[in-house]
Image (cartoon, rainbow, N blue to C red):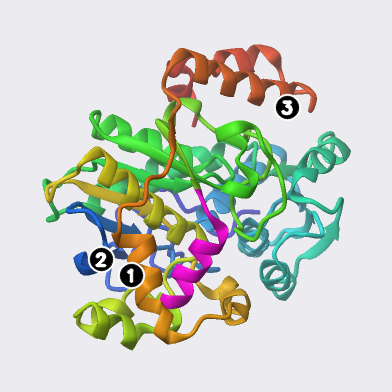
Amino acid sequence: MVKEKLSYKELLNNSSPTLPLNWRKPSGEINRTVIPKQIVGTKANIIVLSPEYFPTGSCNDGAAYFNLKQLIETKKQSSVEVCAFDSAIASYAWAATQFGLKCTIKTPQMSSPYWIKKAKDLGAEVEFEGVKISDAARIIDLNKKKPNFVSQFQNTAAYTYHKIVTGNAIEKTVDGIGDNKVSLLCYPASSGALTGAAISSKKKYPYSKNLLIEPEESSTFYNNKKNTHRMYGMGYGFIPYIHNIYATDYVMLAEEDEVIKTMKCIEDFTAKIATDFNIEIKLVKAMTQKFGLGAFASIVCSINLAQQLRFNENDNIVIIAEDTSSPYKELIKAEQIQDIDSKHIIKESMIDHKFRLFMDVTGQRQRERLFKKKADFWLRRGSDENILNKMRDKDYWDTIN
């Protein structure tokens, strides 16, 4: 039985502060962080939307909540088995507690230890199926016929949550900044649900562009490459079922080492960065602990794209952070960097114009490539070919609820 039937409307009106799933601070303000202009190589405004106050610190919490709410209302289950990776592991474990569900997480052994521990602390069982992140196919194939099985990559409730709630937050994020519009929305290639927010933003700001970031080591969208990497939340080696291909205009690759070093400088050498770049220390501190590697990858890449597109001071770049810095503390700690190197690292990654290739995927050839890659994967999982074909129609995505 559903303990609390939270609705999208309640989240938009901020009338349910006991379940903070709407990108707000406890004060009710949107939890946005503007990156200081002294450390960005573009005139544009870089604004990060942080899930800092979400129950687990992951923006997958809201998607998981509505996914399980839909499961209970349609199938009346008392337990749930979930295919979830990285931050979604803890999100589904938390959401299950809201509905009194027994939760079993199905995930590869290479999933983030931080999120696995958090899920177990929330009372979920974790079963490893496969080793690599690309073993999602194996997990889905083994469990897809179970009536209580859900997948973070497939359920449309997650897409709808981000379309409505995160889309609304994006609109409020640019209030009072630049021209009060979004010029570029940037998000990591993840579960696909975030494309709901990306398409919502595109409808409100039709002249804006959406940029998808993925790791150079596993560049699925860019060139069909899949491999292991340390940048959780992206680069899974396939295109999620609920990924709206029309939501993405550009794809750019992030270099793992560069992103990790940039994050370490901001997190560990706050005072040094403030001094070296003549920034009030409170503005640098405002960047710490709020967003993880996916957000830092998006910051670095979006600055570079803004340089190439010659954005000006009226342009706003909004970045959706999937999680906070907490899962990466051990990774950052292990990175061998001296504080004396921090100025050079920040200058090189965020200020100087270093040409990066990016791919425009709006043309017919690239769209067809992505549609085919997505369909090939999901047809092998037994998905309905008619629905996959309908997904090629932009209007189809408006019917999802």
| Label 3 Cα neighbours within 10 Å, binned few <14 / some 14-19 / many ≥20 | some
Mark-to-mark CA distance, 3 and 2:
41 Å
Residue 29 shows which numbered tag? Answer: 2
Amino acid type of the residue tagged 1 in the rendering: Lys
Question: Where does label 3 land, which residue?
Answer: 377
Q: Secondary structure at mark 1?
A: loop
Q: Amino acid at mark 3?
A: Phe
Instruction: Judge whether 98 appears above or below 265 on screen.
Output: above
Across and down, in percent, residue 194 comes to 48, 43
Disc 1 from disc 3: Cα separation: 39 Å
User: Which of the marked residues, 1 or 3, is nearer the chain's N terminus?
Assistant: 1
Tag of residue 25: 1
Name the element at disc 2.
loop
Residue sitting at x 40%, y 85%: 340
Disc 1 versus disc 3: nearer the observer: 3
Is 314 situated above or below 248?
below
Answer whether labels 2 and 1 touch (C-beta < 8 Å).
yes
Residue at the image point whose x is 50% and y is 19% from the top: 367
Q: In this image, 190 relative to 139: left or right?
A: left
**Residue 40 x %, y %:** 26, 61
Q: Residue at x 80, y 24 (%)?
A: 380
The one of 372 and 141 positioned closer to us in this rendering:
372
Q: Which region is colored magenta? A: 254-265
Name the amino acid type tagged 2. Glu
